[in-house]
Image (cartoon, grey):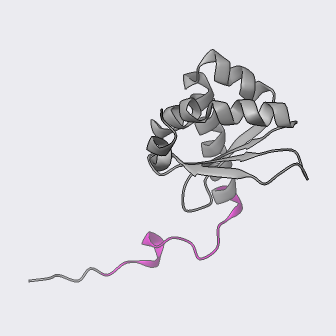
């Protein structure tokens, strides 16, 4: 026998995110970033220090966005994609990584951490 439960309006999510929701999401992203960075190898930390990087959680999957200042750094980050994805996978199995070269120097590269096996040698 199935039992129906009624929900009070207080139990439902808000129809529009509030300012507090945005603040809490940003705090979550900052906290994830700090913990992720602390878990990275020194080599990855040095690469990240040369880039603008941050997490977003407002999509279907948590995304690590890495904006590279030049093509050399972009290639270096791409060469470390397995190490970055492996570290990120310990935080979220459905996360994504988006690596962007400088504007007008190419298209962003995006990988899901569950695709990691394709890039392992």
Decide: is 111 above or below 54. below
Query: In this view of the protein, can residue 13 be seen by the observer?
Result: yes
Residue at position x 81%, y 38% in the image:
68
Instruction: Give the image location of residue 112, x and y in percent.
Output: 53, 50
Q: Toward the viewer: 35 or 92? A: 92
Residue at position x 46%, y 78% in the image:
9
User: Farthest residue toward the left?
Assistant: 1
The answer to whether 111 appears left or right of 98 in the picture is: left
Instruction: Give the image location of residue 97, x and y in percent.
Output: 62, 46
The answer to whether 23 appears left or right of 82 in the picture is: right
Instruction: Give the image location of residue 47, x and y in percent.
Output: 73, 26
The answer to whether 56 appears left or right of 68 in the picture is: left
Q: Is residue 8 magenta?
A: yes
Residue at position x 77%, y 37% in the image:
74
Query: In this view of the protein, can residue 51 be seen by the observer?
Result: no
Q: Looking at the rendering, which quadrant does residue 44 occupy?
A: top right
Q: Toward the viewer: 69 or 75? A: 75
Number of disc labels: 0
Looking at the rendered image, the quarter that the N terminus falls into is bottom left
Magenta-drawn segment: 6-20
Residue at position x 51%, y 70% in the image:
13
Q: Is residue 67 magenta?
A: no
Predominant secondary structure, magenta span? loop
User: Farthest residue toward the top?
Assistant: 42
Instruction: Give the image location of residue 73, x and y in percent.
Output: 80, 31
Decide: is 45 above or below 109. above
Q: Toward the viewer: 115 or 18? A: 115
User: Farthest residue toward the right?
Assistant: 104
């Amino acid at each position: 026998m199935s039992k129906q439960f009624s929900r009070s309006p207080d139990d439902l999510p808000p129809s529009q995110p509030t300012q507090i929701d945005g603040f809490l999401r940003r705090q979550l992203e900052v906290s994830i970033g700090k913990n992720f960075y602390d878990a990275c190898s020194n080599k990855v930390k040095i690469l990240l220090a040369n880039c603008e990087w941050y997490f977003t959680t407002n999509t279907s999957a948590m995304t690590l966005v890495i904006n590279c200042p030049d093509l050399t750094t972009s290639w270096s980050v791409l060469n470390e994609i397995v190490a970055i994805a492996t570290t990120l996978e310990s935080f979220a199995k459905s996360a994504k990584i988006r690596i962007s070269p400088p504007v007008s120097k190419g298209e962003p590269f995006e990988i899901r951490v569950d695709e990691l096996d394709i890039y392992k040698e």
